[in-house]
Image (spheres, rainbow, N blue to C red):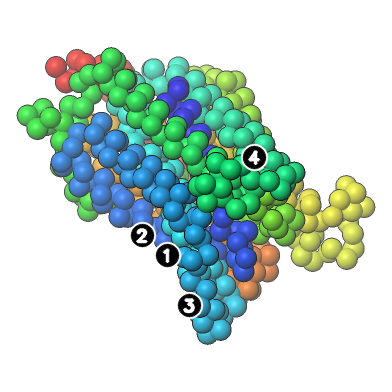
Amino acid sequence: MFLFFLIAFNYHIFKILKDTLIVTAPQSGAEAIPFLKVWAILPSAIILTFLFTKLSAKFNRETIFYVIMSVFLGFFALFIFVIYPNAELFNLNSTADFLAGKLPLGLKGFVSIIRYWHYSLFYIMAESWSTIMLSLLLWIFIVDVLAIDEAKRYYSLLGVARNSAGIVSGFLGQYLAAQALSTASVHSLAKFFGSKTPWDQALLIFIVTAIICGFIIMSLYRYLHVYFYPKRYLLGGDANKKGKQKISFAKSILYAVKSKYVLFITLIVLCYNILINLVEVLWKSQIKELYPSASTFTAFTSKITLITGAVAVFSSLFISGNLIRRLGWRFTALVTPLALMFSGLGFFYFVFIKKYAESANVAIAVFGLSPLVLAVMFGAVQDIFSRSLKYTVFDETKEMAFIPLTAEEKLQGKSAIDGIGSRLGKSGSSLILQILLMFFTTTLGASPVIFGITILIFPVWIISINKLSKKFEEKSKVIQQKIPVEESVS
């Protein structure tokens, strides 16, 4: 639980910062996000997954964890101590200005990721933490050592730990943002490390905290392997090669396509990521319009992170575990698409009022608030639902589906789905947004088309859940209880 908490804590910190840096930068905005996810996130996900498959042939799973963690910590240290204090020197302003004069206005987001390539690199590494550390390496460890019956009992507790991290990181973000807004002074130690403004100082505290957590994570991970799972490093690999496991990158991708069981998991992951990315970019463009500065943007997104964590903790304690045990896998898996379907309607309703009927003051008459405020508010509700359900019932049911697979199938399936599949969903939706921006210039202008696409996603998602449910029940009957790790490798 503590391991889950720390990895998720860093995830939430990076999630808050990656959007703030790129969205609130001068001459940038939420339009940069679709271009990042197509031209930066997807290639990096493919590279990292390829790297993971190569590392598997040279190291056991425990060692891979330390190698990849060291790469992350090294980058974030380099960013906060070297790159960010000299950010203006790294900006490619002349190149970006040249491109801005040559390219259509709809490619403004692409120009932004070139101008702020160092912020784009931070965005890539922040997204990769979610993909590699949280979704892949941590969950591989969990599904290796817990059986299906244990998963039904303990996944909700792991969810509490993970989502409590959202509350703590949200409080931290609000506090640091409030400090940055209320004071003009910068501590002498922060100045020594290159901080020039209160916001720079807040960013320094954020990232140094995450780096310290990283070292604690590695220590705790080692402790678990020494005292609880000393032979886990052999799982899935050749005992004569000390747990090294040669898997093919191409074979992992083909396995995810050819196996109907894994293909349905892939479709579920794709549907979620396409949907959340389409709606989130539109919502963030409205947030920037309402909160244009880095400090106010951070304060708002930190508050949403905090609320999301609280809702997710409640879901972990009282909803997800009880649903899985009492109503089964299928019913629990259907909760996420159905909840997002209804919460998304409210968001799009007020977006359309802002776009088409703002002069009529319909929203002001009913709620006493402007359409922009209501669009941001209902977008926040939709985001809170989507994230809190993702961190509980969605992830728990998805990860349970991997348990009946063999060790090799788990590694191949998870490396393909969590390494590339989730990024492919976001990149695919981002490519759609790029095409729409060419015609509509802004995400608000493209909102009717975005709404139409989201409506089409839900039937595919629900059908995939129903198909996977039948196969999951069949496999679960065959493997009633997983053999403990110590026995399986002895």
In the visual, does 234 lie left or right of 118? left
Residue sitting at 51 percent across and 24 percent down?
161
The span from disc 1 to disc 4 (Cα, nearest Å) is 32 Å
Which residue in the structure is indicated by mark 4?
A: 176
Q: In the rendered structure, are the residues bearing label 1 and label 2 in contact, judged by CB atoms less than 8 Å apart?
A: yes
Amino acid under label 2? Answer: Pro
Quarter residue 401 falls in: top left
Label 1 Cα neighbours within 10 Å, binned few <14 / some 14-19 / many ≥20: some
Q: Nearer the viewer, residue 439 or 188?
A: 188
Under circle 4, the secondary element is helix
Nearer the N terminus, badge 3 or badge 2? 2
The span from disc 3 to disc 1 (Cα, nearest Å) is 18 Å
Q: Nearer the viewer, residue 194 or 304?
A: 194
In the visual, does 239 lie left or right of 86? left
Which residue in the structure is indicated by mark 1?
A: 39
Label 3 Cα neighbours within 10 Å, binned few <14 / some 14-19 / many ≥20: few
